[in-house]
Amino acid sequence: MKVCKFGGSSMASGETIKKVAEIIRSDADRKFVVVSAPGKRFKEDIKITDSLLNAYAECKKGKALDKLLAPIFERFVGIATDLGIQDKVDLTSVFKEIEQGIVASPIPDFAAAQGERLSAMLLAAYLGYEFIDAREIIRFADNGVFNAEYTNDLARKRLSDKQAGVVIPGFYGSTSSGQIRTFSRGGSDVTGAIVARAVKAEIYENWTDVNGFLTADPRIVENPKPIPELSYRELRELSYMGANVLHPESIFPVRKANIPINIKNTFDPQNPGTMILPGVLQHDRLITGIAGKKGFVSILIEKSMMNNEIGFTRKLLSVLENLNMSFEHLPSGIDTMTLIIADSEIGNKLQELVGGIREAVSPDRLEIQSDLALIATVGHGMAYKPGTASRLFTALSRVGVNIKMIDQGSSELNIIVAVSGEDYEKAINAIYEEFIN
Ligand code: ASP
């Protein structure tokens, strides 16, 4: 049996939902369906989740909520009418309840979750499937941390005896006292993976609006080749580093049960998409894909005899811990250590961070460089193949890109380089030309 998750663009309108229903009905194994909230119908459109979050924020500033919810209500009424199910779901009373819920809610999660909830209600009504609320199966602790094992027990019990079809809203769950909590944005992918694990699906199909993963970002490389197969670990590296087809945390539930993920395109259902499989895949591909992110800062810390100073790294990292900041990389030399941190982590705390470092480790020199980009070249194929790094560096030097940092873990699954932000596109194209084209 299969679990299928449909993303926001698949659920965007009555017309696209009909395509979704066709896909589900074309295979009797597609019994468990997880959905996102309606996403964008066209480039300038607004995702329902964004409209709901905006309604929440404006309501807390004192604006009238009924006016803010009106366009959202209209959009769902439009979808229900297009599907011919306006009499099957009482949207007016659901929206009354949503309005009350948002007013009473001290956090945005309740509001954010309503798009998925309504989307699932409508699809369930259209298909004649059972609607099961994610609150019943996905559990968060009171502090908002997702409880994976408890959730798996709950979901298994609730779903295991289901013979007919079920539709479950993605993205949210609740605490044991019933308060709604969401995953981070794009989290319906995670819900799909949780359901797949709970029902021991033979496959987790993730239906989106592209034909799976590409070997590089199509906004940077012209017409990059698709990736037909990917391992779980390659997926983690690529999606963490910016290939955003799938939520990076989706892998954890399915990995526990060795369930393959198939990324498929709702608008091109015959395309095989990308298959994500456990283990190390055997083929002669050297590099699987290239991904990257801009917006990093490096902080070089130099101090003579740092290597002999017991506890130096701990003292340095405790500064980050106190500021609740995580770092990306920490390459070191004999007398130097460099912290690479995302701008988004630093926010407006750079002065505090630098002051803290000076106080904690008294460096001889501290140098900050901003506007860095990280690029990961990923593939199991590079392990034990001499010359991969040299080809990568040669490709970059050929186009005059200076490498600011190199990091290759001993797993030899990827090589990460930091380059200046302005060299980012050039560097990715050079690596693509060398290994993939
Ligand atoms: N609707 C949510 C978002 O826009 C979650 C999801 O689509 O997975 O992030």
Image: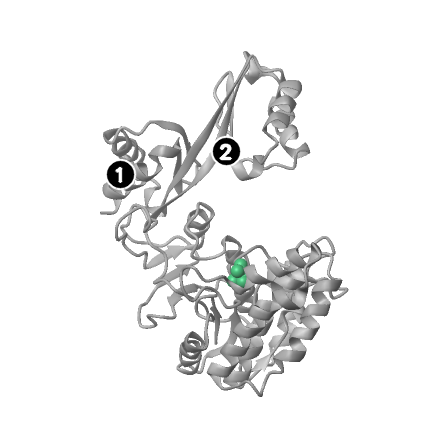
Neighbor class of circle 1 (other Cα within 10 Å; few <14, some 14-19, many 20+) is: many
Beta carbon of the mark 2 residue lies under 8 A of ligand 1: no
Q: Residue furthest right?
A: 177
| Quarter-of-image position of residue 420 | top left
Nearer to us: label 1 or label 2: 1
In the depicted structure, whether residue 22 falls above or below residue 4 = below
Q: Is residue 5 left or right of residue 399?
A: right
First in sequence: mark 1 or mark 2? 2
Q: Which mark is residue 430?
A: 1
> Which residue: 62% across, 19% down?
358
Q: Nearer the viewer, residue 430 or 411?
A: 430
In the rendered image, residue 212, in percent from the top left (x then y), is placed at 36, 60
Q: Nearer the viewer, residue 265 or 103?
A: 103
Q: Is residue 119 left or right of residue 395?
A: right
> Which residue: 62% across, 15% down?
362
Q: Is residue 91 left or right of residue 330?
A: right
In the depicted structure, whether residue 239 falls above or below residue 88 = above
Residue 375 seen in the figure: yes
The residue under label 2 is which amino acid type?
Answer: His
Find the distance from the CA under tag 1 to the CA under tag 2.
23 Å
- Helix, strand or loop status at disc 2: loop
In the rendered image, residue 21, in percent from the top left (x then y), is placed at 44, 80
> Which residue: 65% across, 37% down?
324
- Helix, strand or loop status at disc 1: helix
In the depicted structure, whether residue 377 falls above or below residue 372 = below
The residue under label 1 is which amino acid type?
Answer: Ala
Marks 2 and 1: in contact by CB < 8 Å?
A: no
Residue 188 seen in the figure: no
Disc 2: which residue:
329
